[in-house]
Image: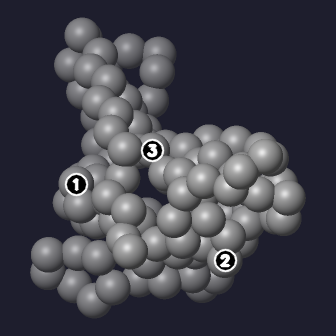
Amino acid sequence: MKEYGKKVWLIPDCFLNSVSKNESISHEAICVINTTSREAKIDFTLLFEDREAVTGYGAVCGAMKTHHIRMDKQVNAQGVKIPRDVPYAVLVESNEPIVVQYSRLDTSAAEMALMTTIAYPVE
């Protein structure tokens, strides 16, 4: 199969809401597709408006696989979870070309809202 994707992606508008008004928990996911014949090691760098960038988050996506990475379950190498109620952006870097989609489920109101978009691929 042909290899698709890029090795660097940007997601500018991320936000983990702490409020949930129903059974589902507000969360985000970074979904990736790896169409290569090699495992993809993925690193996340979080960028904030008013604090230093945070590194050490990551995931692995197997060859010819997809992986839905829940950001509310991420813990970096120093044991730090992604903060809720704080706007941030994500730099996604992979050792293999991947395709990246970002989704947010907001359950802060009784009517849930789902937003999804393809991340910005960097040349």
Farthest-out residue, front: 2
Q: Residues within 10 Å of mark 2 (few under 14, many from 20)?
A: some
Which amino acid type is shown beneath numbered disc 3? Gln
Kindly identify the residue that appears in the image at 14 percent across and 75 percent down: 49
Mark 3: give few (<14), some (14-19) or many (20+) Cα within 10 Å.
some
Q: Residue at x 40, y 38 (%)?
A: 103
Where does label 1 land, which residue? 13
- Most extreme residue toward the bottom is 52
Q: Describe residue 41's horizontal placement relative to residue 30 as left or right.
A: right
For the C terminus, give its image quadrant: bottom left
Indicate whether 13 appears above or below 67: below
Marks 2 and 1, how far apart at CA: 24 Å
The residue singled out by tag 2 in the image is 95
The percent position of residue 89, horizontal first and vertical second, equals 28, 65
**Residue visible at 66% across and 77% down?**
95
Q: Nearer the viewer, mark 3 or mark 1?
A: 3
21 or 98: nearer the viewer: 98
Whether pointer 2 and pointer 1 mark residues with C-beta atoms closer than 8 Å, the reply is no
Pick whichever, 118 or 20, lies toward us.
118
Relative to 85, does residue 39 appear above or below in the rendering? below
User: Going by the image, does 45 lie left or right of 87?
Assistant: right
> Which amino acid, mark 2?
Asn
Report x, y in % for residue 87: 21, 60
Q: CA distance from mark 3 to mark 1?
A: 12 Å
The tag earlier along the polypeptide, 2 or 1, is: 1
Q: Secondary structure at mark 3?
A: strand
Taking the image as shown, residue 67 lies to the left or right of residue 9, namely right
Residue topped by disc 3: 101
Q: Vertical placement of 106 versus 27: above or below?
A: above
Task: Answer with left or right where residue 110 lies relative to residue 49.
Answer: right
Q: Could you give the CA–CA distance between mark 3 and mark 2, rounded to whole angstroms?
A: 17 Å
N-term mark: 3 or 2: 2
